[in-house]
Image (spheres, grey):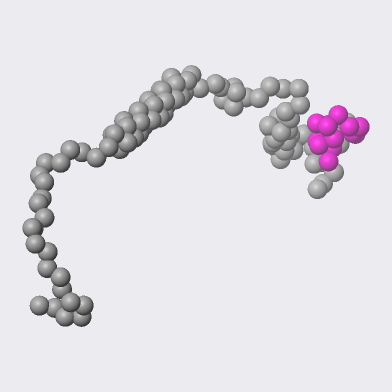
Amino acid sequence: MSDRHEVISAFLDDEPFNSSTLAEALSEPAGRDLLIDLMALRHLMQTEGKEAPAFAVRKPRRSAPRALAAVAAILVALVGGYLVGERRGEMATSGPPPATRVVQAPAAWQDVPLGRMR
């Protein structure tokens, strides 16, 4: 870095500097451009004592109804699932369904000897 860059940086940092060197540095267009660039950069980097920009602090207002609707949907799904499970549980424990047809066994059984088929 040249002396001109250092004197401009010292000026911005509130450090001691030579005023004649600063005047020479700012008399050139490159020195003025450097001063503007350094001021913009330091302005962006300084956050002490300043609040955050408005776009970072903005509280979304539309998300509250959406969040409430999502919570309501989850609650409805949980309660509905619980009630369906309870109903199926009651149906399963109520016993077997009534018979619709009764099958009669034949009157005579035949014994088949082991190892032989008819």
Instruction: Say if residue 84 shows up in the picture.
Output: no
Q: What residue do we see at 60% from left, 23% from top?
A: 57
Q: Is residue 13 located in the magenta-colored stretch of the structure?
A: yes
Residue 13 seen anywhere in this rendered image of the structure: yes
Whole-percent x, y for residue 48 in the image:
76, 26
Which of 113/37 is in front? 113
Image mark count: 0
26 and 92: which is toward the camera: 92
Q: Who is closer to the viewer here, 77 or 94?
A: 94
* Residue found 71% across the figure and 33% down from its top: 45
**x and y percentages locating residue 76 in the rendered image:** 37, 25
Q: Quadrant of residue 43?
A: top right
Q: Residue furthest bottom?
A: 115
Give the extent of the magenta segment. 6-18
**Picture residue at 10% right of the left edge, 44% below the top:** 101
19 drawn magenta? no
Does 4 appear above or below 69? Answer: below
